[in-house]
Amino acid sequence: MELILIFISAALVNNFVLAYFLGICPFVGVSNKTENALNMGLATTFVMTLTAAATWPIYYYILIPFNVPFLQYVAFIIIIAALVQFVEMYIKKASPSLYRALGIFLPLITTNCAVLGLALFMVLRKYGFIESIIFGFATGVGFTLAIVMMSGIREELEFADIPKPFQGVSITLIIAGMMALAFMGFAGLIRG
Amino acid sequence: MANSLSREFTKGLWQELPPFRLVLGLCPTLAVTNSAVNGLAMGMATIFVLFFSNVLVSLVRRTISSQVRIPAYVVIIATLVTVADMFLAAAFPQISKALGPYIPLIVVNCIILGRAEAFAQKNSVLPTAADTLGIGIGFIISLTLMGAIREVLGFGSIFGVKLLGEWFEPWIVMILPAGAFLVFGGLVALVNHISSRNAAKAAEAAEGAAHGM
């Protein structure tokens, strides 16, 4: 039950993009086509789940016993960079076509603040190992949901007559604001 | 020399003003600007990390080989962020609490890595210092402005001082996440509008000068 709650909370109610503003850069940058957005979302979900699985043991079995939790930021970012590198190498070998499709987006995941944010929230909320993995996966699902929805709206927007100063980033953010309003409706799911 | 330094400095204040012109560093811009004080504090913490990390990058730019430069920069940045985080927690525990995990998230603020990659690794220390100070001050102004607008609309106060009277019904939405997106989208549009108007004026002036000849 606890795990389901964590999942719903991270994917819908406290959506990383729309409630915590994490991962806004790819959310704005890669959301112009649904196909790209979906690929980016899936790759990010994958990296997030792995990040949760990798940072948890390192924090609790290395940083805490050696009494150096202040190294967490340095440690986490190195783990994430290394993970992204491995994922990139693996996908390149295993599925060259997927690798070509993801191309530039893969290395960008390192600087996706949602991934580091995930590791930080995991520590802050004192999740256990399984909870952390669920949390990482759910966060990725939430990110994918937000970015795919945004790309769908933006594809339609191409046919809309938007005032010039609002074109591009501006309208994307205003739509994100409306999506954030809509997502606030999910808040009742947890408290109720 | 002094001239080019001041140019490096001032470009961060309008031409490359983050986060409106360079659309970088959006997460902190949106997340912590629910009050002017928080925006200012976040801007200060960011300029500290931005300035010292880029000066360091500029100093070691010849010794770091280009294949490992990104991890090296990230380690420099993460170390400085740890310093800033511990300082804030010790000196201003309230602000540190309000900003929460967004202080450590400065590590992945793309402005910092972006400046290191675009400027510091190609330039010596003085221009780098001028560039980062300009960008940093531009960032502080933007964040404080965002925070001030949201605080006025959402609480009717600015820097915690009551500005609007009892008649004012606060727009709660402005301090919620949705308000951040709306205010930021509006400000981007405003900056676009002003700069396109300036460009049109400049074009007109140039045309007028050409006719005058």
Image: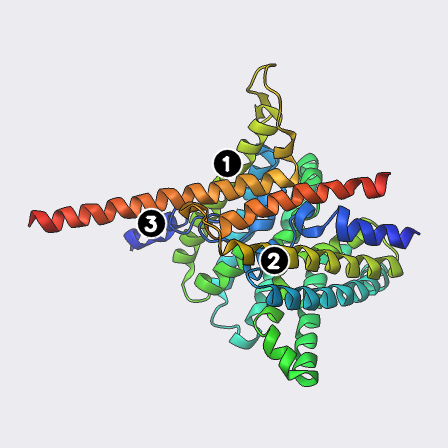
Rendered residue at 55%/44% (across/down): A174
Q: Are marks 3 and 2 in contact (CB under 8 Å)?
A: no
Q: Is residue B177 above or below residue A75?
A: above
For residue B153, what is the image quadrant?
top right
Q: Quadrant of the C terminus of chain A?
A: top right
Q: Residues within 10 Å of mark 3 (few under 14, many from 20)?
A: some
Where is mark 2, residue-wise?
Answer: A152
Chain bearing tag 2 is: A
- Helix, strand or loop under label 1: helix
> Amino acid type of disc 2?
Gly
B128 and B17: which is toward the camera:
B17
Q: Position of residue A129 (x, y in %)?
A: 87, 61
Task: Output the chain of dot 1.
Answer: B
Q: Secondary structure at mark 2?
A: helix
| Dot 1 crowding, Cα within 10 Å, few <14, some 14–19, many 20+ | some
On what subunit does the disc labeled 3 rest? B
* Kind of residue at badge 3: Ser
